[in-house]
Amino acid sequence: MEVLVLGAGLAGLAAAFELTKLGHEVRVVESGSEVGGMASSWKVGPFWLDHGPHRFHSRDARLVEHVYEVLDGDVVIRRRQSRIHLRGRYFDYPLKFGNVVQGLPSGLLARAGFDYLVARTKELVRPTEDANFERWVKKRFGDTLYELFFGTYTEKTWGIPCDHISADWAAQRIAQRSLLDTVVKTLRPPKGGAVRSLADEFYYPAHGGIGEFARRYAGKIVDAGGTIELDAPVSSLVVREGRVLGARAADGRELVADHTLCTIPLPRLMSAAESGAPESVRSAADGLDYVAILFVYLEVDTPSVSPDHWIYLPERHLRVHRVSEFKNFSDAAAPGDRTAICCEITCRVGDATWNLDLAGAAQVAELDLVASGLVELGSTRPLDLRRLAHAYPVYEVGYQDRLRPLLSHAKALDGFTSTGRQGLFRYNNMDHSIAMGRKAARGIHRGRDARAEEVAAGQEYFG
């Protein structure tokens, strides 16, 4: 069977890899100039750069074995270290009770404790629904901790009020469900030597940045007879009488296949009139939004800026929302005497932030790093600038009502499967995207729905 895979991100490459192993003819088309999508890497001088912090972690032993197989064992294991900078201090993240107690003023702690008790008491007396992100957090942590650690950062990242954001986002992104849970999990030793969370340790390619994983996938796909075409954006599906016959490239070519697997943004693909979706589906697709990210890379003449893999900057007066240092992921990412810092600024395509050039973006980033105590003024040099238009699917309140008809229409099409972060409009970690791609491939091979969307569909921690 000839299978056309739209997108060479991890979901698409994982599917293509499995399909070639199962004996299918596979053609992958990718709009970008390198494989990996958001998990791609590139080299600027002696530095390997990623699109922000990426790492692989999973409690699925078979998936971990798969990572080792693809990377031929060229893997390093790191213990996660991440923090949040607030009020001139750094706190461990996910939050640790003792760290918060030591770092906040006693008056603020007292208010936080009182707010927490009030919130929990109200919830016991009169339970409320998780109507949105703000309500989800406040009823579990109280108003003060919400404002300090959750609300400000979330509004800064998404650019919309927290009461407009779905509670789904909180359930995925906040590790503990209440302050009491946080205290217990901090003070109680893990049972049987188990780690406290899925993300305590992670795997990372020893060389070549996170994109090495995608490059190894690509090499194995081509070695098995598959093809990968870069700089080949797709504009629409080719549909006849409810069956997908392939896709139409932006240059007008018709890419014909027995089955088409979509791992690119499904709303954009379905909103094209040529894809044949009903007007109601196209309208629903147009109502789904994305947050874009500007990635600003700075070179610093110091062996290391911090021991952290990444740091959150939630305060509104700073435009950067997250900082990462790739040398802490792999020693091979930078020379011994220098380091590279990635600063992320969320935006919307076409706004003033999106349109910043390297010099302007580097100035913004350095000032925020100085304010956070990470570097001295004038100590950094602009290194690179990257933009991602479809970085985060926006979980706005009611997004499920717009997403549901889109996914239902996609499922009803013969010869078509949509999966992965972009294909399902789902915030996924790397392990989820890989698992979805592999599961979708097995479904295509067997001629039935593999229900890849069930991967990571529960209320698990995605951090």
Image (cartoon, rainbow, N blue to C red):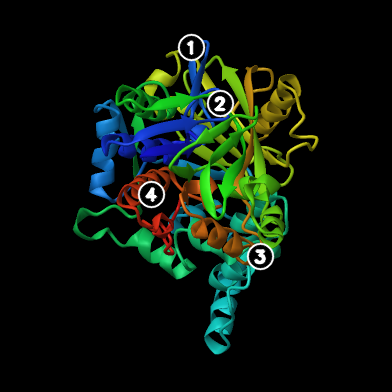
Q: Provide residue 326's location: percent of width, then percent of height.
A: 47, 27
Q: Nearer the viewer, residue 302 or 109?
A: 302
Q: Measured from the top left, where is residue 436 in percent x and y?
A: 39, 49
Q: Which residue is mark 3?
A: 397
Residue type indicated by callout 4: Ala
Front tag of 3 and 4: 4
Q: Which of the two discs, 1 and 3, sits closer to the camera?
A: 3
Q: Could you tell me if the residues under marks 1 and 4 are in contact, i.e. CB atoms within 8 Å?
A: no
Q: Secondary structure at mark 4?
A: helix
**Amino acid at pointer 3:** Val
Q: Residues within 10 Å of mark 3 (few under 14, many from 20)?
A: some
Quickly name the residue at label 4: 440
Name which quarter of the figure residue 398 lies in. Answer: bottom right
User: Nearer the N terminus, badge 4 or badge 2?
Assistant: 2
Position of residue 282 measured from the top left corner of the image (x, y, whole percent): 69, 55
> Which sits in the foreground, 37 or 148?
37
Give the vertical position of 421 relative to 214 (above or below): below
Q: On the rendered structure, is 308 left or right of 312?
A: left
Question: Residue 373, relative to residue 290: is it above or below?
Answer: above
Residue visible at 80% across and 35% down? Answer: 352
Q: Report, in whole angstroms, how far the alpha carbon at label 2 lies from the one at label 3.
A: 34 Å
Instruction: State the CA–CA distance, disc 1 to disc 2.
Output: 13 Å
Quick one: SS at disc 3?
loop
Viewer-nearest of discs 2 and 3: 3
Q: Nearer the viewer, residue 308 or 19?
A: 19
Closer-to-camera residue (241/270)? 241
Q: CA distance from mark 4 to mark 2?
A: 36 Å
The residue pinned by badge 1 equals 46
Is any part of residue 145 visible from this angle? no
**Residue position for label 2:** 341
Sequence-first tag of 3 and 4: 3
